[in-house]
Image (cartoon, rainbow, N blue to C red):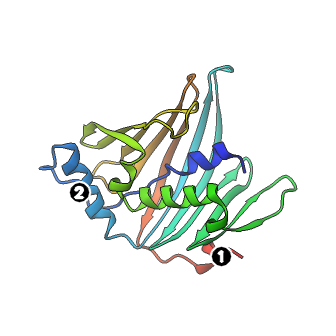
Amino acid sequence: MTCRFLFFALFLVLVPRPGVAASATTLDEVLAELQRLASTVQTLDSDFHQEKYLSVFKDMLPADGRFYYRRPDCLRWELTSPMSTGFVLKGERGRRWRDGGGKDESFDIARHPVMGIVARQLLAWTQADFDRLRRDFEIGLIDRTPVVLRLIPKKGLADGFLDHLVIAFAPGGRHVHRVEVHEQGGDFTRITFHTTRVNEPLSDNLFDPS
């Protein structure tokens, strides 16, 4: 799994119901409401469609996958088409895989700095921990109904790669509808979530790190 794939995974966030209050007009109020809503969520799972735009080819490269989360620290992120690749995290232990002859690899995030960063950032997004996220990004409010955020990385985060992120929530704020990862140089990745399910039972097997 490439570092670039891992970096995309940091920003695949689903923030749940029932919607950002109409009275939340400032950025701080909007983020506080999203964080309040996220605290009610025990599980999330969603399908997604990913499009990678390469400016040199003027073309879009499609992919599809699934995302799963169970409170407090279980995650699974995987591409299912046109290739199978992904990772699962349960507490401090994890496993990652890639098709094409590659074998599964187990890891401990305490001994694997890259996956430790992935785990902390992805959990921060899923749990709407904006206090933590503000350490790495300048967050701006593009729109309130529905909520659209623009995130600019602070100096030292993904230097030479990331220009900015756009996070667009579905109407009502129940979950993220679209994530855009804009790279320096014009390339970008757009991920659109669909068929999102909140607080439904998830099998323990989904998060098996062995």
Q: Element type at marker 1?
A: loop
Q: Quarter of the image holding residue 39?
A: bottom left
> Considering only vertical position in the picture, is 66 above or below 3?
below
Instruction: Write down the residue under mark 1.
Output: 208
Mark carried by residue 33? 2
Residue 36: percent from left, percent from top: 26, 63
Q: Amino acid at mark 1?
A: Asp
Q: Residue at x 48, y 78 (%)?
A: 201
116, above or below 183, in the image: below
Q: Give the class, few, some or many, for how many residues have Cα within 10 Å of label 2's Cα (few <14, many ≥20).
A: some
Going by the image, does 142 lie left or right of 3? Answer: left
Q: Relative to the observer, which residue lies in front, 35 or 57?
A: 35
Q: Could you tell me residue 44's position as x and y percent?
A: 46, 66
In this view of the protein, which residue sits in the foreground, 1 or 113? 113
**Is mark 2 in CB contact (under 8 Å) with mark 1?**
no
Q: Is residue 190 above or below residue 186?
A: below
Identity of the residue furthest to the right in this view: 101
For the residue marked with disc 2, what is the amino acid? Glu
| Numbered label attached to residue 22 | none
Which residue appears at 33% of the width and 57% of the height?
A: 174
Which class describes the residues within 10 Å of circle 1: few (<14), some (14-19), or many (20+)?
A: some
Question: Quick one: label 2 or label 1, which is nearer the N terminus?
Answer: 2
On the image, the x and y values in percent for residue 182 come to 51, 32
Look at 33% across and 63% down and name the residue there: 38
**Quadrant assignment for the C terminus:** bottom right
How much space separates mark 2 and mark 1, taking CA atoms? Answer: 32 Å
Q: Nearer the viewer, residue 197 or 153?
A: 153
Q: Which residue is found at the position 17% from the left and 43% from the top?
A: 26
Q: In the image, is 29 to the left or to the right of 107?
A: left
Left or right? Give the position of 150 relative to 102: left
